[in-house]
Amino acid sequence: MTGRHSPAFSFWLNYVDSRGGLWEQSGDAVLAVLPDRLSTAHGLPESALITDDADISREDGVLFLGAGHPAIDQAAGTVIADGDIGTLTLEHRSRPLSTEELLTKIRDQVAVDHGRIDATGAPIVSARSLLRLEVLVSHTVSAEDQFTEVAGCLVDVPSRVVWPEPSADRLCGALTASVPSVTAALRAVDKNLLLKALIAAHQELDAAAARRGRQLASGAAAERAAEIARAGEYYAAALATLDKRRVDADAQRRELLAARAEATRAERDRRLAEIDEKHQHRHELRPYRLHLVDVPVLRLATDVRRGERRWPLLFDYLPLLGTVAPTRCPSCDAHAPLVATRAQLCCTTCVPVRVAEPPAAPPLPKPAPAVKPAPKPPAATSPPPARKPLTGNSAAQKPAARQASLSPQLDTLFGALAPRPDDGRPFLPGKPEEKKVTAFWEHVALGERRKLARLIAPESPLAALVRLYGPSGPLHGIGVPVGQMPTGITCGNYDRPVAGGRGGTAGELRTRQGEYQYLLLWSPDRLLEEIHPYSTPWHLGRAANLARTLTAQTPPPAQVDLDLVATLLSTRTTARHGLAFTARSLAAWWRLPDAGSLLARFGPRVLAATLDRAIRYWSGAPASYQEAADAFHTDEDLMRTATPLLQKRLQLSTTRNW
């Protein structure tokens, strides 16, 4: 009955209904009967004829109630303040599908590269949770131009993927005829999943509001430019007048006019900034509806197969939309097309993109191509049969070990390539270096410190870890708890420079209790100089931006006597940022010439705090004087004085950041 009324008037009638009032059509107007509290709240009579047609409202006794009326605005504010929160369940009304029919639909819509989807059971009638969030978006384009719009989105709770607008419209249209259910949907949904879905919905609406705001702001760009031009002309004329008056003025008068000109420039800058801020777009989201919806699905248990390998996966088919619900990668949790590799089921985000080979590098002493062929899973390695502390299993390799090729996409995303050292092309490891890595982990497992030292660059962060904790230092550097020993490794070389323009070998170390990723970096003279607790080609600073510390476990006490500076670094830097930064800081401290004179001048706390901040700064991580001074309980001004002296002796840079 409200179809011929305006949206504002229809809203008011629905509002009266929801608050216990009554209304019915009476000729061209509507007879509304309001409860006492509603009549008092909105200042309206208890019984009145109302309309949203201006011509009809001219008749005696008919009250006009159209868009912009205070009563409607007040009602809208009340509804928004109360919110609309609840759960809904859509009934399952579609015809049943056979296993073959449902499997065909899933295969048509879900592509698995190098894999095949096979059913392992019959379809099950179930429900899938969706989250519906609707908000009022208030746009402020300028001081005079403000807009309010309605926006909403529908998020698939298990996958946290926003449904496209046509699908969301169909689902929301089906909700209008549904009846609120008991809180069964809330009991069935994990709270963490619900929170993540809510965050995804808010981010989607916020991004959509920002895009809409740019469209609205483009219309005000001409007005902003005109106002800036007028202000610029006004202040330019004022400054020109002052300059003209200064020509014939005496010295004292010229000083006064110069001061006035400076004040005019400051006033001009303030006014231009004010105009710019006035036309700066801002938006605010005000949620008013949050529904948790159970949508009927046909659930099919399947196996994704590649040869004899199988990976179980559940698919939900929504008959209402005729589509399969979105899925996420079981390996990295990305929403991307699936790929069945020889080792695991992952997605196109996990598998490096194949790229064309760049031109070959100048020949090395041992002839070998500078760039390896397209990526392939590196073979797992094991030590000689006579001594078997480590074993490898190529079928159990993880994605980290298979990322042996660095694509331009990863370069861009993680900033893997830094300016290269001035001494020429960095050394890239090959097959001999993979054997060295196997020997390296073997020596670590057996505690052979002398043999380990032959593979490690002197005065490097890796050498600092071994000096600090003995042969177990590399294990602590990647987060292996005390008492756990390696049982197997995988490794593969990156075919381009990584993490500061150096060669890299990445993989995974296994113990009886867990698995730990690692990235080993090579020096130009083919020795190992750093180890990081991840296998991606990240800078240490970039990795630090993704986590508070890079190793979660607490390392044991040092095995050697440490001076006060080294003690402070090994405790406070490790606790705040992880062992990777501690190793760099200690390596810098232990190679510092004439440390005694600096200690006599600044003291241990100042030097430890200065080194801590400098290493993080040159590693590309957030580094502030105040944070380091607070952590080491020292003076920030003394740190600033010590910094150039340390830099002169250490010559730190983005490629030599220890």
Image (cartoon, rainbow, N blue to C red):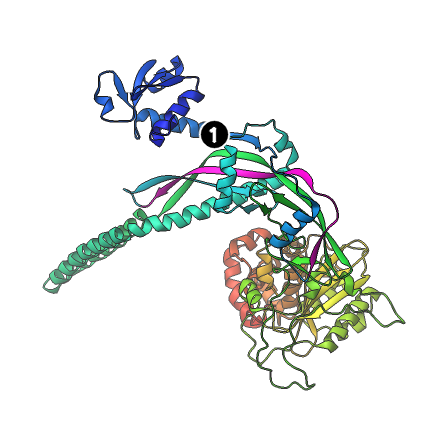
Q: Quadrant of the N terminus?
A: top left
Image coordinates of residue 355 in percent, x first then y, are 58, 72
Counting every numbered tag in the picture gives 1
The residue pinned by badge 1 equals 83
Instruction: Categorize mark 1 by other alpha carbons within 10 Å: few (<14), some (14-19), many (20+).
Output: some
Q: What residue range appears in magenta?
A: 115-141
Mark 1: secondary structure: loop
Choose top left, top right, bottom left or bottom right for residue 146: top left
Name of the residue lying farthest toward the left = 248
Choose top left, top right, bottom left or bottom right for residue 628: bottom right
Q: Residue at x 57, y 56 (%)?
A: 545
What is the three-letter code of the residue carrying label 1?
Gly
Q: Is residue 120 magenta?
A: yes
Towards the viewer: 610 or 53 = 53
Towards the viewer: 250 or 156 = 156
- Up-down relation of residue 533 to residue 69 (above or below): below
Towards the viewer: 229 or 210 = 210
* Magenta stretch prevailing secondary structure: strand
Image coordinates of residue 368 in percent, x first then y, are 68, 83
Image coordinates of residue 277 in percent, x first then y, are 32, 49
Q: Residue at x 56, y 31 (%)?
A: 88
Image coordinates of residue 395 in percent, x first then y, are 77, 63
- Up-down relation of residue 146 to residue 599 (above or below): above
Q: Is residue 555 left or right of residue 617?
A: right
Q: Quadrant of the C terminus?
A: bottom right
Q: Residue at x 75, y 71 (%)?
A: 437
Choose top left, top right, bottom left or bottom right for residue 424: bottom right
